[in-house]
Image (spheres, rainbow, N blue to C red):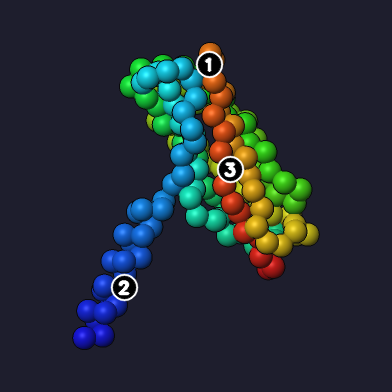
């Protein structure tokens, strides 16, 4: 009985993670399927003061979107993101790994990191995600 309850609990957690795994921006680029979205983590990323965490952000392309997208990342005081800027080219997979470093004296609690995607032509798309800084 206990094993079955544990299995059900694990399956519930996996299902909830799949449902809330990522958050998408409003479309950028052009119209119809000539658009893209910036995709960031939907749940807060935990990082301790003085440590590093890695998160994945993505450019999700519409079928007709064939432009490069420049991603620019802005972090608040106490957090550093690497890279701060990169370009996702049309043939690239679209995933970018961001290293988030919390300074030893980074403010504790929830912080917001902004990701902006700007295509060669058309509207930019931007979205923020949350990082929770805790004491080491």
- On residue 101, the disc is none
Looking at the rendered image, the quarter that the N terminus falls into is: bottom left
- Lower sequence index among marks 3 and 2: 2
Viewed as shown, does residue 71 lie left or right of 107? left
- Lower sequence index among marks 3 and 1: 1
Kindly indicate the quadrant of the structure image that contains residue 61. top left
Alpha carbon separation for disc pair 1 and 2: 45 Å
Residue occupying the point 31% across, 66% down? 12
Q: Element type at marker 1? A: loop
Residue occupying the point 62% across, 40% down? 114
Q: Which residue is mark 2?
A: 9
Residue 42 in percent (x, y) is at 48, 50
Q: Element type at marker 3? A: strand
Pick the residue in front: 11 or 35.
Answer: 35
Viewed as shown, does residue 98 lie left or right of 11? right
Residue 21 in percent (x, y) is at 41, 51
Residue 82 shows in the view: no
Q: How many marks?
A: 3
Residue 74 shows in the view: yes
Give neighbour class at mark 1: few <14, some 14-19, many 20+ (Cα, 10 Å). some
Mark 3 in CB contact with mark 2 (< 8 angstroms): no
Q: Which residue is mark 3?
A: 128
- On residue 122, the disc is 1
Looking at the rendered image, the quarter that the C terminus falls into is: bottom right
Residue 47 in percent (x, y) is at 61, 59
Alpha carbon separation for disc pair 3 and 1: 20 Å
- Lower sequence index among marks 1 and 2: 2
């Amino acid at each position: 009985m206990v094993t079955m309850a544990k299995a059900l609990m694990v399956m519930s957690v996996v299902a909830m993670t799949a449902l809330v795994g990522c958050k998408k921006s409003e479309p950028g680029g052009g119209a119809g399927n000539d658009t893209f979205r910036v995709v960031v983590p939907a749940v807060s990323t935990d990082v301790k003061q003085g440590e590093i965490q890695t998160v994945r952000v993505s450019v999700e392309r519409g079928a007709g979107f064939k432009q490069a997208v420049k991603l620019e990342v802005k972090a608040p005081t106490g957090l550093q993101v690497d890279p701060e800027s990169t370009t996702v080219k049309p043939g690239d997979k679209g995933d970018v790994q961001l290293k988030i470093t919390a300074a030893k004296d980074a403010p504790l609690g929830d912080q917001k990191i902004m990701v902006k995607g700007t295509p060669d032509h058309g509207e930019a798309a931007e979205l923020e995600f949350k990082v929770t800084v805790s004491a080491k």
